């Protein structure tokens, strides 16, 4: 990623934060064998004599769309408080293989991270389990295709790892391109999941912030087949 290509992905910028359009396939930070990640490029957004912005939250490697970066220590602390309290409104778009039985509803399934016996700590999966952490996702069907796919709007009330992906699979609607939770293990890099928008207000003395990410190229055909009319 070049300085210009990263700056072209800035959706919002002010003295406290950036919101950028993270590309699918790019991890946000180093983990395991990942060597190419977003944090390497954040200095491109920093002032010449200042610190680069830092991650205010995370997105899965294969998820595209809105990612918030804090520019000051106060902003990063404030975002931590806001995410914990559910004061950052997040909306996702996804294309799923299958259509939910109801046009809208709530998926309330606790999720548990499981490390396989004898495996390294990097070999894990997320499973619905009553012993797991509470996880709640609201969904709405925005459109369907002739081949049985659905275009979903999803609003997670909690922020568990892989929450949307596991919840959709649990109701019989795994996401298109799903490498882990679908009926077959597909190569990573084609997940049809977009962090479509974020909305928040840092404090009463600051104006509300809203940002919307465009549909990425790899999702456009599937979205169009489900009735999407473009941006």
Image (tube, helix red, strand yellow):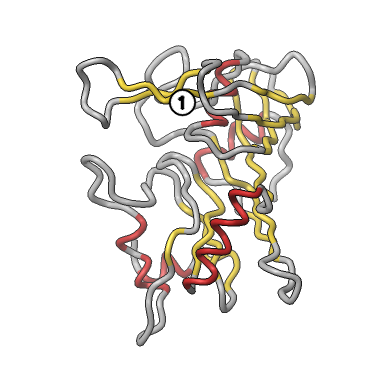
**Residue under the point 59% across and 28% down:** 134
Q: Position of residue 219 (x, y in %)?
A: 55, 38
Q: Position of residue 98 (x, y in %)?
A: 63, 16
**Pointer 1 local density, CA inside 10 Å: few below 14, some 14–19, many at least 20:** many
Q: Considering only vertical position in the picture, is 19 above or below 180?
A: below
Q: Quadrant of residue 60?
A: top left
Where is mark 1, residue-wise? 178
Quadrant occupied by the N terminus: bottom left
Q: Nearer the viewer, residue 39 or 84?
A: 84
**Residue under the point 53% across and 59% down:** 68
Give the farthest residue toward the bottom.
49
Give the farthest residue toward the right.
103
Left or right, 77 with respect to 206, comes to: left
Q: Nearer the viewer, residue 62 or 118?
A: 118
- For label 1, the SS is loop
**Residue under the point 57% across and 42% down:** 194
Q: Considering only vertical position in the picture, is 98 above or below 152?
A: above
Q: Position of residue 11 (x, y in %)?
A: 58, 64
């Amino acid at each position: 990623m070049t300085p210009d290509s990263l700056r072209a992905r800035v959706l919002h910028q002010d003295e406290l934060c950036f919101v950028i359009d993270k590309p699918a396939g790019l991890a946000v930070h180093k983990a395991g064998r990942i060597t190419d990640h977003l944090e390497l490029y954040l200095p491109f957004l920093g002032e010449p004599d200042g610190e680069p912005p830092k991650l205010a939250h995370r997105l899965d490697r294969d998820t595209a769309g809105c990612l918030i970066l804090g520019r000051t220590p106060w902003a990063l602390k404030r975002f931590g408080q806001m995410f914990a309290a559910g004061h950052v409104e997040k909306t996702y778009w996804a294309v799923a293989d299958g259509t939910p039985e109801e046009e809208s509803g709530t998926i309330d399934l606790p999720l548990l991270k499981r490390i396989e016996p004898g495996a390294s700590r990097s070999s894990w999966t997320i499973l619905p389990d009553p012993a797991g952490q509470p996880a709640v996702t609201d969904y709405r069907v925005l459109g369907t295709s002739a081949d049985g796919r659905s275009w979903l709007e999803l609003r997670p009330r909690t922020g568990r790892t892989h929450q949307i992906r596991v919840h959709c699979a649990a109701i019989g609607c795994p996401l298109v391109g799903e490498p882990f939770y679908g009926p077959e293990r597909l190569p990573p890099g084609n997940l049809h999941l977009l962090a479509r928008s974020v909305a928040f207000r840092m404090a009463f003395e600051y104006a509300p912030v809203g940002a919307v990410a465009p549909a990425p190229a790899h999702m456009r055909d599937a979205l169009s087949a489900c009735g999407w009319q473009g941006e």
